[in-house]
């Protein structure tokens, strides 16, 4: 729906250039969003899909296992959008203190994404509000190491940035001047917690609007894309829609990145919030349904492999304990497997040989010592869509 720009332009100096920087008007929009007919039905379907995702705990024997793996999958996908080549296997190897198969900075970025999310969720569980202070804390975690660690982690930017192009003068988009950032972010924080009638929108709609606003402000020198995607999960959790941070749109945005950027621009230039909301809600519905299907596939995989081990001849108790350990960490060293399973190293080694012979596990290093094993089918399910760009 074509209206008018959702902000104003201000002059800003970037290097030796003076550019027109876009300053968004505070949320909510000055007009009422059209949430009737097909859009209302889409909102209801997305909400129902989130309800099914939130009840995933009833399906899984241990929801924390799924959360552990799913958070790391999201970290890989979100970082790939920003140009890293790290895979889920690379991240898990890095967490084992093993050398991944990609540049160190790539996997460090992904690891720091996990740290930022876990920090944010821990603070919310403590009763700390979703506010600018928390976003800055998460940004400090996100940019703690590797690329971008020299770009003021945890601090709103004090210089002009831009998106696309080789310099501000030919950029695709120029966010607000640095002197406007604090006010813009204060207004966004107020909107997130606004309980007045004008701000009392469904949580999903508020998250959709807040994401665009955050990306438009681009308040940090680096890491805005990743933190802006995390903001969605944080708002859905704080708003009571999801008990665990299980809804991540990175794969959806990765698959539709051209449309995504076009819709952000349409909001800014034409005020077409509805087209963005439709895209966002479709992504929520698809992503939530996909997460539920992934969980069901993993439950069935675990059931089948457990049954295969139980049907083995001879003593299989240690093999079952090793298989259970691989469910907790689908990529693990033999020494850690033994320690986690509470069995001796020789017993863990014999059990792992059985799992390898059954085609359930595979050794990664090719070494005789310090071997690392992977639960292939489990990792393959999680890796779908996670191939590097």
Image: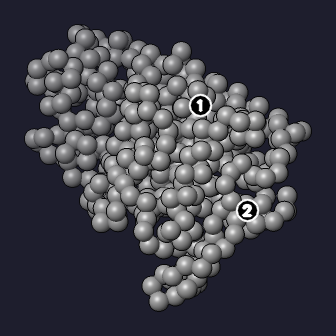
Residue at 58% of width from left, 35% of height from top? 236
Q: Position of residue 384 (x, y in %)?
A: 51, 44
Which of the two residues, 327 or 362, is positioned nearer the viewer here? 327
The quadrant where residue 39 appears: top right
Residue 30: mark in rendering: none
Residue at 60% of width from left, 79% of height from top? 11
User: Residue 387, relative to residue 374: is it above or below?
Assistant: below
Which of the two residues, 120 or 47, is positioned nearer the viewer here? 120
Q: Position of residue 36 (x, y in %)?
A: 87, 39
The quadrant where residue 117 appears: top left
Check disc 1 and report its element: helix, strand or loop. loop
Q: Name the residue under label 2.
A: 6
Residue at 31% of width from left, 14% of height from top? 312
Spatial separation of the CA atoms under disc 2 and disc 1:
25 Å
User: Residue 77, relative to residue 14: is it above or below?
Assistant: above
Q: Mark 1 points at which residue?
A: 239
Res 113 visible: no
Q: Where is residue 294 in the image (x, y as percent from the top left)?
A: 54, 32
Res 276 visible: yes
Which of the two residues, 56 or 207, is positioned nearer the viewer here? 207
Query: Is 341 situated left or right of 218 in this image?
Result: left
């Amino acid at each position: 729906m074509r209206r008018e720009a959702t902000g104003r332009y201000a002059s800003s100096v970037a290097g030796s250039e003076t550019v027109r920087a876009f300053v968004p008007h505070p949320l909510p929009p000055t007009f009422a969003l059209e949430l009737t007919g097909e859009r209302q039905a889409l909102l209801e379907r997305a909400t129902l899909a989130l309800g099914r995702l939130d009840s995933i705990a009833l399906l899984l024997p241990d929801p924390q296992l799924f959360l552990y793996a799913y958070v790391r999958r999201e970290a890989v996908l979100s970082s790939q959008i920003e140009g890293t080549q790290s895979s889920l296997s690379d991240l898990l190897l890095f967490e084992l203190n093993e050398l991944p198969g990609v540049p160190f900075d790539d996997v460090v970025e992904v690891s720091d994404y996990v740290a930022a999310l876990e920090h944010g969720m821990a603070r919310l569980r403590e009763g700390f509000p979703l506010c600018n202070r928390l976003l800055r804390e998460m940004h400090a975690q996100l940019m703690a190491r590797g690329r971008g660690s020299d770009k003021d982690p945890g601090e709103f930017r004090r210089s002009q940035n831009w998106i696309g192009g080789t310099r501000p003068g030919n950029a695709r988009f120029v966010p607000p001047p640095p002197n406007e950032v604090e006010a813009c972010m204060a207004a966004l924080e107020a909107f997130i917690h606004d309980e007045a009638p004008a701000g009392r929108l469904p949580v999903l709609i508020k998250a959709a609007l807040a994401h665009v606003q955050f990306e438009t402000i681009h308040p940090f020198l680096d890491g805005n894309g990743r933190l802006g995607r995390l903001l969605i999960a944080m708002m859905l959790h704080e708003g009571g829609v999801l008990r665990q941070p299980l809804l991540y749109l990175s794969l959806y945005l990765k698959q539709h990145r051209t449309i995504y950027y076009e819709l952000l621009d349409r909001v800014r230039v034409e005020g077409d919030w509805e087209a963005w909301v439709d895209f966002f809600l479709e992504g929520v519905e698809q992503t939530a349904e996909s997460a539920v299907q992934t969980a069901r596939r993993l439950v069935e995989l675990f059931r089948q492999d457990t049954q295969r081990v139980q049907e083995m001849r001879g003593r299989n108790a240690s093999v079952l304990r090793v298989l259970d350990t691989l469910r907790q960490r689908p990529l693990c060293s033999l020494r850690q497997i033994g320690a986690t399973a509470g069995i001796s190293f020789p017993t863990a080694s014999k059990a792992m040989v059985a799992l390898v012979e059954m085609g359930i596990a595979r050794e990664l290093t090719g070494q005789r010592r310090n071997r690392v094993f992977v639960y292939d089918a489990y990792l393959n399910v999680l890796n779908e869509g996670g191939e590097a760009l």
